[in-house]
Image (cartoon, rainbow, N blue to C red):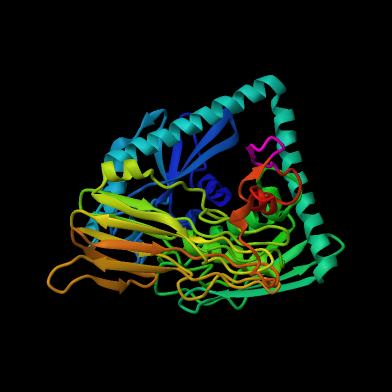
Amino acid sequence: MQDAVRFQIRNFPEMRDGDVIVANHPACGGSHLPDITVITPVFHDGKIIFFVASRGHHADIGGISPGSMPSNSTELWQEGAAITGFKIVEAGVFQEKGITELLMAPGKYPGCSGSRNLADNLSDLRAQVAANHRGITLCKQLIAECGLRTVHAYMEFIRANAENAVRELLKQTAAKYGPRLHAKDFMDDGSPIELTVTIDPATGSATFDFSGTGPEVYGNFNAPLSITYSATLYTLRAMLDSDIPLNQGCLGPVTFYIPSGCLLSPSKDAAVVGGNVMTSQRVVDVVLRAFNYCAASQGDCNNLTFGNDSFGYYETIAGGAGAGPGWHGRSGVHTHMTNTRITDPEILERRYPVVLRQFSLRKGSGGAGKWRGGDGVVRELEFTVPLQVSVLTERRVHSPYGLAGGHSGEPGRNLLIKGGGDGGKRTINLGGKCTVKVEAGDTVMICTPGAGGYGAPDAAGGGNGDDAMQVENNEGEVAVPYLQTGSYLKRKFEQYSN
């Protein structure tokens, strides 16, 4: 987000009160095209003092497939509307005509469509503008109460506190494991992501060097620089024992080296739609492995989209969470940066031509260990009309790793079950990335990855973390313990353990 705001400050040096900027281009601090960022300057006494920004994933912004999450894109223009910067509100007036033209522009490319649900896009963008306005109102109330100088000072204090906390983490890590950390993992196509962390034990500064990472791919899991920055920021914050707000200060001690032209620093026209939802997860896995912190979680968002020329639907599907020293991994949850919720079954079946046949835990898919990795899930959808379906997934080849003797989790798989007919039912492995046409009665089954276990399993197999999700108090009532110590990851993954 910080890179997106900085780019627009350079792009629009003359902003006025009442202007609002919209952008989504990966070369301008964006993640992937469906994530549209809305940025509003905050004025005080005629000068810009802050910026308020919101980023929302839009269900469809055009491109070669409904849902704008194609499995087979190789160029950015195939993934939907790309906006480097546009004043969606100028002098207080919403520019509906201009933003409509931008959202429908992908239709000029071969095989592409403009937005398949423009009304939803416009409503969602208005909601983002309104959210920013609310943020500005609260910001001005704070300034009126405390004074601008005090507000500015405390924002600097928050950043400085975060930087100091990360420096202390890095010093402790260097004392425990030495000043040089290294890890390497692979995408399912074999592309490596390699990281060497060099820590100065005296200052707590560190260099995160991604030399050895594979080149830009002829596919869509290239990740713009902002993805690696954000994934590293998240991971450092997650490993802290102190409970601090997530902010840019966490990266204060860190210097990045990411080779130009690798899949973490691709060319500006490279396809990137999978980088935000898959490669980001692998970056987190690599950082956690370098710090020897915990086993890998499912490492994927399990992206499923379906639709036709009139609508697009998109969902991400949960999996297993990695185990660590002192906690079992959770089963059937989203992990790390995937802050999404899935559509309620009743709403899904009422609004879309599908029947949800199964949504259950994938028992035994978590890796064994002293602390067991969480299980993935099985999600099965039957389609009632002909549609186009895309799956964009990872960890179908390389399993989520275990740590300290723990076993790896089971990789995921994607199956298409063709309905009856003279040939009977057929079960087809779709692989990790695929776009298919389905008929009424066909079913897609997504089996998501389990997570890695931590520590060598005992004779009983390490136990199952889900056995401890409910804890009885002295009165025999079910209670959920609230953990107040340990890092964010430890507290999150251990929240329902005894």
Answer whether residue 110 is visible to the viewer in this image: no
Q: Position of residue 145 (x, y in %)?
A: 68, 20
Q: How many marks?
A: 0
Q: Is residue 480 magenta?
A: yes
Q: Position of residue 109 (x, y in %)?
A: 24, 61
Q: Is residue 472 left or right of residue 418?
A: right
Q: Please tell me which residue is depicted at 31% across the width and 40% down the height of the picture.
A: 120
Main secondary structure found in the magenta portion = loop
Residue 476, image quadrant: top right
Q: Is residue 385 above or below residue 298?
A: above
Q: Please tell me which residue is depicted at 36% across the width and 32% down the height of the picture.
A: 94
Asked whether 45 or 298 is in front, the reply is 298
Where does the magenta region start and end?
A: 473-482
Q: Position of residue 2 (x, y in %)?
A: 58, 48
Q: Is residue 71 above or below residue 166?
A: below
Q: Please tell me which residue is depicted at 62% across the width and 73% down the height of the picture.
A: 407
User: Which residue, as the protein is rendered here, is positioned at the far top?
Assistant: 145
Residue 288, image quadrant: bottom right
Asked whether 251 or 438 is in front, the reply is 438
Q: Is residue 177 above or below residue 318?
A: below
Answer whether residue 394 is visible to the viewer in this image: yes
Q: Please tell me which residue is depicted at 50% across the width and 73% down the height of the picture.
A: 187
